[in-house]
Amino acid sequence: MGEAPGQRGEAVFVPEYPDHASEVAERYASWGFRSGIEVYDKKAHENPFKHGDAYFDRAAIHFAYLVHLVTMGASPEKQFETVYKAVFRAVCKSNQMPYTRVEHIAVSLDLGADALTPEQNARAIIGAVDAFSRVCGYAIVKEVIICVDNAEAMDAVEKVLAEDSYRGFGTQEGQAPFDPDKWIVEDEGCSFCNFDD
């Protein structure tokens, strides 16, 4: 609690808009990630990303990567699905790509999904990590650190973990129906096991 994500992980997940870099990402410019943020911003302006995408910045700084999760600006009823998809894709890339393998990931509980409660945010993030660990035959990723900035958020994370409510959660209140297992099979197939770019 109270730690910036970049202080703990080899890969730091930051929320982004589909068509430009976010203010959150800009905070990491002074940490040596300016060039990667500019590359993301340029790519996003030229060809906007889709909500739920994850873009891995290849330029490692001090043995850390900035991973851009396209979660900001999603419609309120699609935010749970968006966060889940982006985290799942980012953890897969962190584990599988030859140039992006990392053991420790840091992510803020707030990924720009302002329509979600802290508990829903925690359920989406932890559920995506859990799904990855169940689907993938092995994992280089050993730790995902969720960084929070207040006691309410910490309570939400602990509740989700204690109740195992990150599995089989079904539809979230205020959110469009989303079946993660179906999405992984139909949309992703075995691409998470693919070492190609």
Image: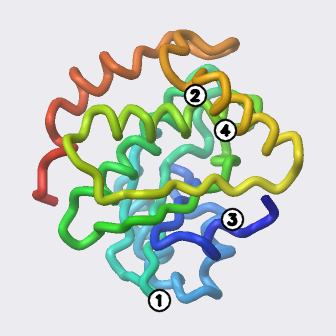
Question: Given the image, on which type of amino acid does mark 1 rest?
Answer: His
Give how far across and how far down residue 80 sits, in percent.
57, 28
Q: Which of marks 1 and 2 is in front?
A: 1
Secondary element at image label 4? loop
Question: Given the image, on which type of amino acid does mark 3 rest?
Answer: Glu
Mark 4 Cα-neighbour bin, 10 Å: few <14, some 14–19, many ≥20 = many
- Do the residues bearing badges 3 and 4 touch, measured as CB atoms within 8 Å? no
Question: Given the image, on which type of amino acid does mark 4 rest?
Answer: Ala
Of 52 and 93, nearer the camera is 93
Question: Given the image, on which type of amino acid does mark 2 rest?
Answer: Phe
> Tag 3 or tag 2, which sits nearer the N-term?
3
User: Which residue bears the numbered disc 3?
Assistant: 23
Give how far across and how far down residue 149 sits, in percent.
82, 56
Q: Nearer the viewer, mark 1 or mark 4?
A: 1
> Tag 2 or tag 1, which sits nearer the N-term?
1
Of 82 and 169, nearer the camera is 169
Residue at x 35% of width, y 39% of height: 132
Left or right, residue 43 beside residue 69: left
Left or right, residue 5 beside residue 186: right
Give how far across and how far down residue 102 sits, in percent.
36, 67
Residue at x 56% of width, y 10% of height: 171
CA gap, disc 1 and disc 4: 29 Å
Of 145 and 108, nearer the camera is 145
Residue at x 62% of width, y 77% of height: 28
Secondary element at image label 3? helix
User: Which residue bears the numbered disc 1?
Assistant: 62
Disc on res. 113 = 4
- Do the residues bearing badges 2 and 4 touch, measured as CB atoms within 8 Å? yes
Give how far across and how far down residue 97 sits, in percent.
21, 62
Residue at x 58% of width, y 57% of height: 145
